[in-house]
Image (tube, grey):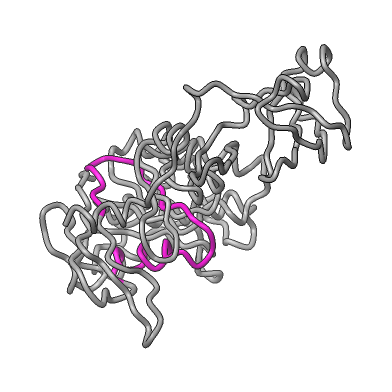
Amino acid sequence: MHEAELELIGVAKRYGDTTAVRGVDLKVPAGAYCCLLGPSGCGKTTTLRMIAGHEVATDGDIILGGRNVTGLPPAERGTAMMFQSYALFPHMTVLDNVAFALKVRGMRKAKRRDEAMERLKLVEMTQYAHRRPAELSGGQQQRVALARALVTDPSILLLDEPLSALDPALRLRMRAELKRLQHELGITFVHVTHSQDEALALSDLVVLMKDGHIEQSGTPRDVFDTPRTAFVARFIGAHNVLTEAGREFSLRADKLRLTDVDSGRRAATVTSVEYQGHYVLVRLSAGDELSAMVGEEAMLARPVSEGDTVGIDWSDGDVIVLGRPEADETRAAA
């Protein structure tokens, strides 16, 4: 397997009068783990399918490893896709499922089975090689689907919400497994998700999409610490969006302090108090809907209850002024 850089240049997808993806410009470094993040209908899965060749781009170019693959069929792109449904053949054994793509390519039976067993070893599934998919758990089926995607030695692996069908505990284990595999293989991963936690935990590059364009991209820390727009601040979580003197700004929930009414910048009404383990989440109404993450000791020293009126305060250095999305900045520069 070898890593490859991915670049999208002005990539768009229209279905009649509907624009699903509009003018996406993106560069994913070779060997990076990239998450396309966003709500349903934002264009992230359509973008992934255009990279794979399962959707034809209406406009723009898809460059993979320095080669323009925009007009190539999926099998000639050097990509592999792992589908949300896993799409395993129920009548085939695990081994034959993994080897199937090599069979289509005409590889000899002994050779393709050796290759398939190597990929099953990679995902720790060799002991299940002769079972059928119905005899496996959801997590085991996912590992088989992953082995099948990797058997063709792709330079880029595309993953369409691969963890969404798993229960929370298994999702965490498989998340760690994906990260381990990506590091071990060194190939580029592009992973579609609607989960902020998943994107922040897994990726080197987070690409947050809205309405078919990129709202913001960067490292997980960049996107979390310095959201560019109100949409990013709200979607990424743990941020408040406040309006003051006609401008919008973001303030992390752990930077919002509760005070006496007289010493706060604003008065606020406590709407709920939720114990979260190592902190207490206090939701507030102060013109804007806000939340504060209050440490246990601070809550014991100054307990609050639903319906209380409190003051809220913050440090000016923690304020992030919100502006335009990345796509607008790109257009303005052009």
- Residue 36 magenta-highlighted: yes
Is residue 265 visible in the rendered image? The answer is yes
Closest to the observer: 205 or 305? 305
Q: Quadrant of the N terminus?
A: top left
Give the vertical position of 21 relative to 172 (above or below).
Answer: below
Answer with left or right where residue 192 lies relative to residue 242. left
Residue 286, x across and y down, in percent:
71, 40
Give the quarter of the figure containing the C terminus.
bottom left
Residue 296 sits above or below residue 3 on the image: above
Looking at the image, is 103 positioned above or below residue 330?
below
Q: Position of residue 226 (x, y in %)?
A: 43, 35
Residue 47 position by quadrant: bottom left
Residue lying furthest bottom = 16
What residue sits 40% from the left and 73% below the top? 20
Q: Residue at x 46, y 34 (%)?
A: 320
Give residue 276's quadrant in the image. top right
Left or right of 326 in this view: 320: right
The residue segment tinted magenta is 26-53
**Residue at figure coordinates x 13%, y 63% from the top left:** 68
Q: Position of residue 29 (x, y in %)?
A: 23, 42
